[in-house]
Image (cartoon, helix red, strand yellow):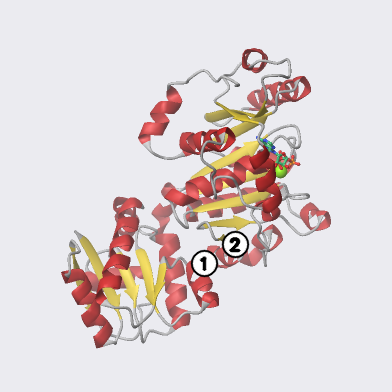
Amino acid sequence: MSLFVLVSPDTDFAQRMAAAVDGGLPGTLRVLAGAGLPGQPEDLFGVLGAVPDVLVIGPGVALEPALRFATVMDIRFPGVTVLLAAEADAELALTAMRAGVRDVVSPGIDAEQLRVVLQRGAQAAESRGRSAANAAGQEGPGAHGANRGRVIGVFSPKGGVGKTTLATNIAVGLGRTAPLRVCVVDLDLQFGDIASGLDLSPEHTLTDAVTPAAARDSLVLKAFLTLHPGGFYALCAPRSPAEADAISPEQVSHLIGQLAEQFDVVVLDTAPGLGECTLAGLEACTDAVWVTGMDVPGVRGLRSSLDVLAHLGLVPESRHLVLNMADPKVGLSVKDIEVTLGVPVDVSVPRSRSVAYSTNRGVPVLQSPRRGDKATAALGQVVERLSPSDSSRAARRAHRRVVVA
Ligand SMILES: Nc1ncnc2c1ncn2[C@@H]1O[C@H](COP(=O)(O)OP(=O)(O)OP(=O)(O)O)[C@@H](O)[C@H]1O
Ligand SMILES: [Mg+2]
């Protein structure tokens, strides 16, 4: 049973929403017929005596406070789906999505269409974890730290091995199952190419995201993220190496902490090597994806890096080793690599023209997958290993030998 809540003075809209819920949705509707929202989500929960699953901000409610309320709700109570009924052009729709609104519908929407949107909203609320939302509601905002999202970093000592390719595809893949709950961050501060790899023209970059205003207020930080059409957020690298130099590892650590409180998953793309900001990223990681090509210097470099990190106690518990641009004809076998590294290869991604083409188009292969392409399938396996479902975690424990074909 879901609790649907409408805040709107528009009685006609309320009637259509009542018809939508009565027309086959398992749940109840509460209507707050005023034109204003309470100051904080907790005030709304107090009036209702419950946490809603789906909150519809209806016609007649002023937009600016509505979007601010939606942002606070998204950050503090991500289990509640917020929908907006307003005449929206593309710009308003984007602003609303950035504020955490899941869907924007026309105020004239009919009951049947509204039922479909409400059903989707209720499903999203359910999958985001109703219990987590309730827990946050009962324990107050201080409890939010316990709900930190996962931080998945992609690392390699060498350049050009496919870190950005993996990071962008992981964001696309995980973003599909958790819309608007994933954020990819370009920690290759000097020469990052997440923006180009995702065909984005960001208005703001990491430089804005570490300013005191954003560091203090996660609502300000969220306004500096760029929404990708695939339903996830990106924080792109600074515009110049000089700007990048001004960012400290402490700022990076703080930023990742803020993002992990707002998103289910934060994906970090990194610069080659183990620079200070990369180490700050690694320290925050719940999962580290290590990438290597099939070349002796690359594999040896990774071995040295893993040794140093183990010595520093900096290897995250969950480790995934990806062999990229795998090729059976280069005189090095998976076994050789595993013996040198002392860890098993988890996924092997073959060299593929479609991957190189996708980088040049700015459309990760998982965004428009081509059936039968082995590299696409292997990237899908990486996403599956990182997906939160129990079955894939079990599959991860049962390691299967990788073969380069
Ligand atoms: N499996 C693959 N098959 C073919 N080309 C690939 C594959 N993986 C990556 N590439 C290509 O290799 C190039 C480098 O990839 P990518 O930018 O992801 O590497 P990187 O490790 O992020 O590099 P850098 O260290 O410079 O940031 C890109 O042009 C990409 O398309
Ligand atoms: Mg890169």
The secondary structure type at the circle numbered 1 is helix
Q: Are marks 1 and 2 in contact (CB under 8 Å)?
A: yes
Position of residue 144 relative to residue 119, above or below, is above
Q: What's the residue at 51%, 79% (across, down)? A: 89
Residue assigned mark 2: 225
**Residue 285 picture location, percent across and down:** 56, 39
Which badge, 1 or 2, comes first in the chain's sequence? Answer: 1
Quick one: quadrant of the C terminus?
Answer: top right
> 45 and 266: which one is in front?
266
> 224 and 252: which one is in front?
224
Q: What's the residue at 47%, 79% (across, down)? A: 88
Q: Which mark is residue 98?
A: 1
Q: What's the residue at 48%, 53% (across, down)? A: 263
**Residue 256 picture location, percent across and down:** 58, 50
Quick one: quadrant of the N terminus?
Answer: bottom left
Q: What's the residue at 79%, 58% (across, down)? A: 243
